[in-house]
Image (cartoon, rainbow, N blue to C red):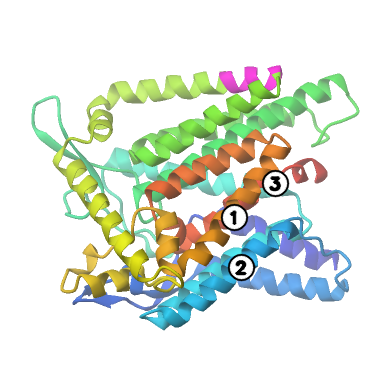
Amino acid sequence: MFKLKKIIEYSLYLLAFILPWQTRLILRPGSLNGGYFEYGSVGLYGTDILLLIIFCLYILYLVKMKFSIFDFRFSNALFMIGGLELTVFVSIFFSEDKSIAVYKYIWLLMGIGLLFLLQSFDYKKIRLLYSFLLGVFFQAVLGIWHFLNQFAYAFKWLGIAEHDPSTLGVSVVEAIGADGIGERWLRAYGGLDHPNIFGGLLAIGVLVVIFLLIFLKRNIQYSEKNTQYSIFNIHSIYKYLILIFYFFLLTFCTALFFTFSRSAWLACAVGIVVMLIFGIIKKDWFYQRELLKIILFVSVLFFILFINFENLVLTRVRAQSRLEQISNIERMESYQNGFEIIKNNFFFGAGIGNYTMALEKNNPGQPAYSYQPVHNVFLLVLAEIGVFGFLFFVSLFLYVFYQAIKIKDGFAVALLIALMILMMFDHYFWSLHFGMMFLFFVVWLMVIKPPLLENK
């Protein structure tokens, strides 16, 4: 049993590390109006295989232990999760493409299974955070290299596609250079499908690093006053960890800047401000001091990057260039299309994963790439699974918010608000595999305390 438990534990650490990587085997490429259609594709992801193996081993472990160690700390939210799952299942019967609906329903089950494992299994949660951040670190390094190199090479074994700024459809920033000539700058992708998705991952990663930095510094202070106590038993390891995390923060923020994702910038900034506000409310002077040091560090870094890439930042902020205006027009049109689909499928939805099919039905004859989900997770959920599923979806986050406010958990509230901002401006937390898995991982992050201290 001890060996089985260790296999499950270290497999979870591995899963957290590879979570951002999108290696997959495409079983059925999607096709629409003669073009490749991502939202109609069916594939098997490496993370899914690992998660299924872990889940099977965990069930075996529970059976061997006669379920005596079972403890699901999130049990009060089972009603919301169960209601969400049921409404998604029902939406399958109202979908245009039932095979895609079943496929996306399995995604939801995988996300719920991930949350179940992270909440119920006994492991060292701080180690899992370290594994996750290490995975994000490699993504950040890759994203920085892509931006500085202004080219991303394809590597199928890690799920990385080629991105050339001269190719139409690749996410770039168009700006006027110092010589007065127009330029196309490749935005950082990392190993993900879009710079906005990469930016969302980094924004959450920055908040986690800040939380761990303050957590470690507080334990240094505590262990200095109580020499018998040390979470890691070796006092000197704290200082090395703090240096590592500051390096992580430097790397994450640099990569976040190079994504030029306005929603990710906003989510990260607001999340940090929320953490500071809670420190002030709780009158935690140590927390405030350490967080202000981190804010100063991040501010200086962004100022240096802004000086070197001022024209790119101003282009994104002012949103007056050709590409920015096209993007804004497309977003407004997507909202109009979204409201139309919601009106026609208000109670039971168009079916999970079937928004783009419903969009094609309303506007036939367009190229495949023009059919995109509405850039708002809440509208997308309402359109795909109807008003009842939408209420269960929202109630899950309201429950997490209530629990965090009750214990004045600034980190959880900061993560929740950052997540809400990201979901308000994009769709990937519901429409893409990584987004669905990452959504439930972030929900777990919101309820991580006090287990950090319980697993010394």
Task: Give the Cα separation between the discs numbered 3 and 2.
Answer: 23 Å
Q: Image height check: is 237 above or below 90?
A: above
Q: Which mark identifies residue 83?
A: 2
Identify the image quadrant of the C terminus.
Answer: top right
Q: Residue furthest left?
A: 180
- Quadrant the N terminus occupies: bottom right
State which tag comes first along the sequence, 3 or 2.
Answer: 2
Q: Is residue 291 magenta?
A: yes
Name the spot of residue 422 as percent of width and height, x first. Answer: 44, 46
Other-residue count near label 1 (Cα within 10 Å), few / some / many at <14 / 14–19 / ≥20: some
At label 3, the amino acid type is Ile
Going by the numbered disc 1, the residue's amino acid type is Ser
Closer to us: mark 3 or mark 2? Answer: 2
Give the side of residue 293 with respect to residue 98, left or right: right
Is disc 3 placed on a helix, strand or loop?
loop
Against 289, is 196 above or below? Answer: below
Q: In this view, does 357 lie to the left or right of 323?
A: right
